[in-house]
Amino acid sequence: MTDVTVGLMVSGHGYGHSVRCAEVARALLQRGVRVVLRTDAPRWLYPDAVEWIPTQQWPLDIGVVQHDGLEFDIDATRQRWCEFLHGFEDRARVEGDLLRASGVDVLVADIPPLGFAAAARAGIPSYGLTNFTWDWIYSAWPGFEEIVEGIRGAYAKAHGLFRLPLHGDCGAFRRIEDVPLIARKATRSRGEVRRELNIPQRATVVLLSFGGFTAKGLHLKSSRALREYVFISTPPLWVDDPPENLLVLKQAPEDYVSLLAACDVVVTKPGYGIVADCLANHVAVLFTDRGPFREYDVLADGLHRLGRARYIPREDLLRGDFGSHLNALVHSEADWTRQPMNGAEIVAERVVRRVTI
């Protein structure tokens, strides 16, 4: 046991940030560390033993404004960030007071700029954890110059960054330490999950996954013709009058990664969480683009290099025209990566060592 308290401040943009930080939280808890969390992401993503810092009247992070799992709005993102910058220092003071009141010894943030500003206000050391930074994402878009400058100023307050593989330019941080991938492994067998869902053990199963968003314009009735496949959708993705080979789950599974591992293919847009989990569990990925988002190119390249993946044009995806793409993918014999995926344990160990030495 240790009397160390680690704070986590995690962007609520999508699930990828929380998926990996939840693994870090588990690794810290296993070491007897007290973990307190500030995030706008859902509570169910994290271990029950994590203590929550109350959500304030403002978001912790802006991220990217999304209409659904495939479309985002650059102009709306710029507007919200401009509004967020006004009063940024006052919010940092309040957030810092909350960290201090919670007895936080060290902060790990993924990757809201407000977290580092708050830790500096509170006199608490802070470290980033990410494969990309928001200044890198926004600097590719017009009209974000002031926003990027403000973000880089906040990141510069951090003591360092734990940089994950499949990363972009993280040069806004003064000190960078590379760590292995953080990925989840299934806790239940493929056979057990399939029996529970009444899916034949030898079926070729395809999971539709869009990071907790819907996919506007996606038509799945044409999948009826692909009788050799069983498709699965989870909330909030919903299909009225689904074809017989589409299993529509009414509730999101508590153990999502075991559901993923029970499938042969995931159809998705590439985000860090889904990419890492597919690589860890050897699930092939049929992916489409996500617009002018810099992380996409890095993750798409990683999928092809480290696992089994195939690109599907957006128009084919929305039409549900999966046949030729799935047939090519399920017959792929590409090798799976053997790189370590114990990043959560490495980060936890390094964070605790920073405080206890």
Image (cartoon, rainbow, N blue to C red):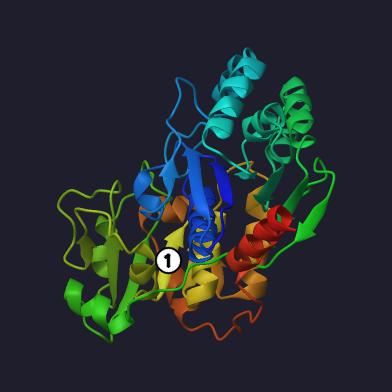
Quarter placement of the C terminus: bottom right
Q: Position of residue 231 (x, y in %)?
A: 29, 66
Q: Residues within 10 Å of mark 1 (few under 14, many from 20)?
A: many
| Residue appearing at x 29%, y 59% in the figure | 254
100 left or right of 331 in image? right
Q: Does 92 appear above or below 289?
A: above
Q: Nearer the viewer, residue 300 or 8?
A: 8
The number of discs equals 1
Residue at x 71% of width, y 24% of height: 147
Note whether residue 312 is visible. no
Residue that badge 1 annotates: 266
Q: Is residue 316 left or right of residue 27?
A: left
Task: Evaluate whether residue 130 shows in this view.
Answer: yes
Question: To which quarter of the image does residue 249 belong?
Answer: bottom left
Q: Position of residue 175 (x, y in %)?
A: 83, 49
Judge left or right: residue 102 versus residue 108: left
Residue nearer the viewer, 138 or 4: 4
Label 1 sits on what residue type? Val
Give x and y (percent) for residue 168.
74, 51
Q: Is residue 291 above or below residue 130?
A: above
Q: Decide: is 175 above or below 181.
A: above
Q: Residue at x 56, y 86 (%)?
A: 333
Secondary structure under tag 1 reads: strand
251 or 89, which lies in front? Answer: 89
Q: Where residue 347 appears, x then y in whole percent?
A: 65, 61
Along the viewing direction, whichever of 251 and 241 lies nearer the viewer: 251
> Residue at coordinates 35% horizontally, 53% vertically from top-left?
48
